[in-house]
Amino acid sequence: MTPRIVVTRKLADPAMALLRDAGDVWLPDPDRTLTTAELHAAVAGAHAVVSTLQDRVDAALVDAAGPQLKVVSTVAVGYDNIDVPALRERGVVVTHTPGVLTDATADLAFGLLLSVTRRLGEGERLIRARRPWQFDLGFLLGTGLQGKTLGVVGLGAIGTAMARRARAFGMDIVYTGRPGTRRSDAERELDARLVTLDELLRISDVVSLHCPLTPQTRHLIDADALAAMKPTAFLINTTRGPVVDEAALVDALARGVIAGAGLDVFENEPEVHPGLLELDNAALAPHLGSATTETRTAMAMLAARNAVAVLRGDEPPTPVRS
Ligand code: GLV
């Protein structure tokens, strides 16, 4: 029987072609995220679902799909939108796309860091508002990075790639992570030092978040954590919005508790806290971490390969293991 493959968002052409070779592909609506009801209706009878981080994937989705469902392949590295234990219990394999988006995401994180420390957004807004300006030795002064300390929360692949970029800019690296996750290789390569979260917040000039969103990391950066940071420090978040208490961040940025923030992700995406929109010391991007043509194509290809492997009874290249 030809497998039915439901794709919730249009993928790069080569990935769509790979899936079409493996089964009947159904793309309900290429242009928008489906509501939960639409998603459940769309997956009925599916053997594979290729989804994105906007789709809630849980027991109800598996029930809506039916017992023939074999695999949910998400086109993302993060899978906090997927109830992995519920799917595993029902015999459904979950796969994701680590590795191929590491550099693109670290590039974006570093771009946000440069943007907020060098006040690029402020400068651009000033020019576009046609406000008068001239070169001046004291005009729009930012903050240099050389000799400063980057604190990486979660020294996985993307955190390590961010730290490499920071080393190239002359920064020192400290990191923290889940208990027992010492990264000796990265420590040697980057001269990085493992510290507690408390120490990291206290000594870092830039805190960059690269941990996954889990019950333990939800609001990891709350009002207390922000108060523990230096008033001259910057916060960068390219992981998931709810790792930061966004209302507390707005308050901290407005009151000068920290110097600035670079954010690619938001607590209630695509909504952005209105307070952030008023703040010049927040550099904002609409979840663009992996958004290059090359990276999105590689992610789509990996997601397609994962789905096809499971449909054929093979081990997928990058299953979710946790
Ligand atoms: C993007 O946020 C991803 O998890 O791939």
Image (spheres, helix red, strand yellow):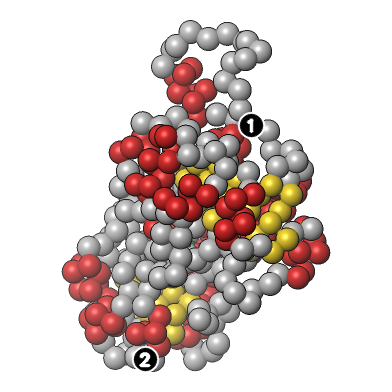
Residue 113 makes an appearance in the image: yes
Question: In whole angstroms, how far apart are the C-alphas of marks 1 and 2?
Answer: 51 Å
Residue at x 38% of width, y 41% of height:
250
Left or right: where does residue 315 sit relative to residue 36? right
Label drawn at residue 23: none
**Disc 2 marks which residue?**
89
- On the image, the x and y values in percent for residue 99 come to 61, 66
SS type, badge 2: helix
Q: Amino acid at mark 1?
A: Thr
Residue at x 57% of width, y 20% of height:
140
- The earlier-in-sequence mark between 1 and 2 is 2
Pick whichever, 212 or 285, lies toward us.
212
Left or right: where does residue 203 sit relative to residue 320? right
Left or right: where does residue 322 sit relative to residue 271? right
Number of marks present in the image shown:
2
Residue at x 63% of width, y 31% of height:
143
Q: Quadrant of the N terminus?
A: bottom left
Pick whichever, 311 or 244, lies toward us.
244
